[in-house]
Image (cartoon, rainbow, N blue to C red):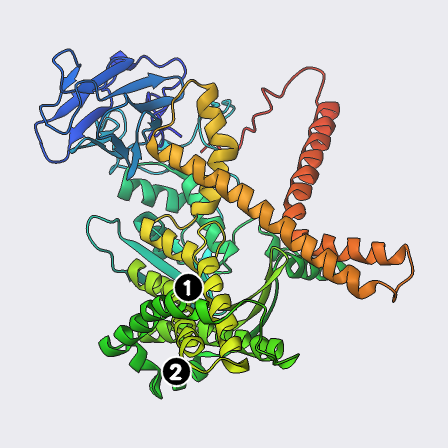
Amino acid sequence: MHVRRDFPYCLRCGTLRRGAAPTSFAAPRLRGLDDPDLLVPLTGEVTTLGRGADSDVVLADGSVSRRHARIVRDASGFRVEDLDSFNGTAVAGATLHGGSARLDDGAELSVGDVRMVFEQPRDARIGSRTVMVGTQLTELPAGAVAEPDAPEAHGPLTARPRRRGGWALKQVPTSGRAEPYWVLSNTRTGGYLRLDEREVFLWNALDGDATVRDLLFAYADRFGELALPRIEAALAAFAGAGLLRGLPGRQEEKAVSGPRRVWRAVYRALLKLEVSVPGLDGVVSRLYAGGGWRFFTRTGVALVWLSLLGGLVVFFAVAQDRQHLLDFGGSGVWGPVALAVGYVSALVVHELAHALAVKSYGRKVRRGGFMLMMGMPFAFVDTSDMWFGTRWSRVVVALSGPVSTAAMAGWCAVGAAFLPVGPVSAVLFHLAFGLYLNTLYNFNPLMPLDGYQALTDALRVPRLREEASAYFRKGLWRDLRAGRRPGPRQTGMAAYGLAVVVGTYGFLVLALLAWRSRLGEWLDGRVPSPWDTVIVAVVVALVAFPVWAAPVRWLVRVVKRRRAAAGDGRARPADGTAVDGAPLEGTA
């Protein structure tokens, strides 16, 4: 999208317009953030940066390598490439080691410790970020063909989206050099969105009077870029969270028939099978006020860690020499029954520890219950209100459950070590052993459990599993085909993504085998063949529905797109009036 027809670059991504002569206009530049005298016009196709004298831009800083990075202009815009520097090159907070990244207008980059910003020209003759005179600056003449590099509007620019009621917005305190962010909550559904400064600006501008075109100009006036795709994505996210009305094309604004509504409800239930109890905050608040707060004092925390560490020592030094696995001390069937009761009680305490930790930070626990994930049952409490807290408070909440389980295991280990040998000490030994295994499993960083949640908050990567697995499946092979060597971060993401893929499908296979074995044993002799096999197959398919539903939906979308493309090809006029299939509307 260009501010004027004679503007040579796209303000959103820096793309060179077809047919433009960049030497006749002011070139984009790099401007130093800490050194106001550092101004580097990017007139050539390649501009090298480094400490060496042969660099186009010499940066005399000890953190800069001799050949550190280069800025490359190509048909799609500008990008920065790190030349395997020692300290790396960072763009918008993401560090590159041998990689590359696109440069949008206003993008901040760090070459070692030298901070700069990439800027498009601000001359009024070409297009100023603060001077917007009506809509004629962004409209193409009538009958003009849309340029392929310009972003297209996917909805009418005259729409007037407006906020719905029942929301809360809060800025989350950050530490150090972390970028500030906000959390937008839907108080009706309990959903949350994490927003940055620009998305908060858009949210505050949604008063019901401003059109999408008005938002476009206001955004450009504030941030210096006509980022229509970003605005559309933010509006879609707001609408998807149930916080926005008046956005064209949203499914929820269309009438849905009864059978279709039932199918959607069944589909959501199969994707996430859960039984939850709402309104737990009052109960948890009373438990916290009645004495739960004592566990979060210095004395309480010290006793919990003493139970954890002391229990480990006692378990390995004393208890395992006195007890043996699968030996319940002659308790008969009551030993396994008592063990099951102990596991359930420990599970309740585990989730209660999460809830009490949430209350210790003054946040709400909206619900709790059980859910089926990857074919296995899990208990949970909703701690999503902690998005209003700091990342370290979320780490504490995530670790409070496993730590409480390990502390309970420690007390069981003490009982197994020092009580007389018999049924009670035997059951306590098995309970301690099982709870220690449960603690290790909860710290597993490959599954979305407590350890993973703590890891993502500590690393500031909320979607670590998704990003790592996506990079392993697509990004890694794309880099290798392009001849780009992955840096340390990319290598770590690829390794973690491989572990996530293998671990997830391995866990799923074990879960399905367990279901098949248990269900087959129960049906044996009760249901005649081959109906027992059919029942097992149906149950296993339902359990694995979240896994195979996504590929099936992708395949259905591909088939629909191909059918639509084939239909468009048959309906196209013979004189070829359509140019490259590009729509004429939506380019403003």
Q: Amino acid at mark 1?
A: Ser
SS type, badge 2: helix
For residue 59, above or below residue 434: above
At 32% across and 67% down in the image, what residue appears?
309
Q: Amino acid at mark 2?
A: Ser
Disc on the earlier residue, 2 or 1: 1
Residue 308 rendering spot, x and y as whole percentages: 35, 69
Residue 171 rendering spot, x and y as whole percentages: 29, 60
342 or 126, which lies in front? 342
> Mark 2 near mark 1, Cβ–Cβ under 8 Å?
no
At 48% across and 58% down in the image, what residue appears?
441
At 38% across and 19% down in the image, what residue appears?
17
255 sits to left or right of 97: right
For residue 262, above or below residue 105: below
Mark 2–mark 1 Cα distance, whole angstroms, equals: 21 Å
202 or 160, which lies in front? 202
Residue holding disc 2: 285
Q: Quadrant of the C terminus?
A: top left
Q: Residue furthest bottom?
A: 290
Res. 483 image quadrant: top left
207 or 510, which lies in front? 510
SS type, badge 1: strand
For residue 102, above or below residue 450: above
Q: Quadrant of the N terminus?
A: top left
